Image: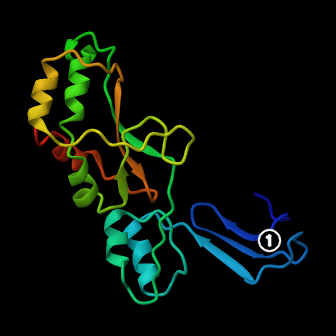
């Protein structure tokens, strides 16, 4: 980033980790923008970003958490927008762990797919900000599969763990992001993932 700017705005002030102030670039190839200036502030806490929006002190906020987005839904003067992302969150097994032969057993991987409460995590923990996606390629990419054959089914997991699975896939995709920065801490995920074990 430099002060000259070649787009709609040029940088007027840069304060590392605090703010950037940009002003309209009248010589932009696309013409001068409608806004005379833009201030981008670094506000690390999502709850603070939500309050700035609610109080009218900010016009836009990114990377709000599921709780913050849930709290803003339906508020007067606030429009919540969700934009699909190619980012995925998934479970991965350390199949090279020689101290734990269970991790290199494909039957275990197959059984584990039936022990994840996909719907519960999506609805309750992530409040609808993710959707279940159980394929390697993200939705929107050519060749991406949109089927979700696995559901929370401990009984099926027990049966599958005793059989040799057809699939040799080593990872199980859990959720695809709709918004960014919605992943809860590991301490929140762990009880949700392991409640059937």
Query: Image height check: is 197 above or below 51?
Result: above
Question: What's the colour scheme?
Answer: rainbow
Q: Which residue, as the protein is rendered here, is positioned at the far bottom? A: 76
Residue 74 visible in the displayed image: yes
Residue 197 visible in the displayed image: no
Q: Is residue 119 left or right of residue 197?
A: right
For label 1, the crowd category at 10 Å Cα-Cα, with few meaning under 14, some 14 to 19 and many 20 or more, is some
Q: Which residue, as the protein is rendered here, is positioned at the far top? A: 98
Residue 167: percent from left, percent from top? 32, 21
Residue 82: percent from left, percent from top? 47, 66
Query: Image height check: is 130 above or below 38?
Result: above
User: Is the N terminus in the top left, top right, bottom left or bottom right quadrant?
Assistant: bottom right
Q: Secondary structure at mark 1?
A: loop
User: Is the C terminus in the top left, top right, bottom left or bottom right quadrant?
Assistant: top left
Q: Which residue is mark 1?
A: 8
Name the residue located 32 percent from the left edge and 76 percent from the top edge: 71
Q: Quadrant of residue 100?
A: top left
């Amino acid at each position: 980033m430099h002060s000259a700017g070649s787009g709609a705005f040029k940088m007027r002030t840069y304060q590392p980790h605090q703010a950037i102030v940009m002003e309209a670039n009248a010589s932009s190839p696309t013409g001068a923008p409608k806004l005379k200036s833009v201030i981008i502030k670094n506000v690390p806490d999502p709850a603070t970003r939500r309050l700035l929006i609610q109080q009218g002190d900010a016009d836009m906020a990114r990377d709000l958490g599921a709780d913050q987005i849930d709290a803003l839904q339906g508020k007067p003067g606030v429009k919540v927008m969700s934009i699909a992302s190619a980012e995925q969150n998934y479970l991965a097994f350390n199949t090279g762990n020689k101290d734990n032969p269970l991790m290199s057993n494909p039957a275990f991987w197959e059984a584990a797919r039936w022990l994840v409460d996909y719907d519960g995590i999506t609805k309750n923990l992530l409040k609808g900000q993710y959707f279940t996606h159980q394929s390697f390629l993200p939705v929107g990419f050519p060749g991406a599969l949109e089927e979700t054959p696995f559901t929370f089914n401990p009984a099926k997991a027990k049966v599958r763990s005793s059989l040799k699975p057809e699939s040799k896939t080593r990872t199980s995709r859990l959720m695809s992001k709709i918004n960014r920065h919605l992943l809860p801490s590991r301490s929140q995920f762990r009880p949700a993932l392991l409640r059937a074990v």
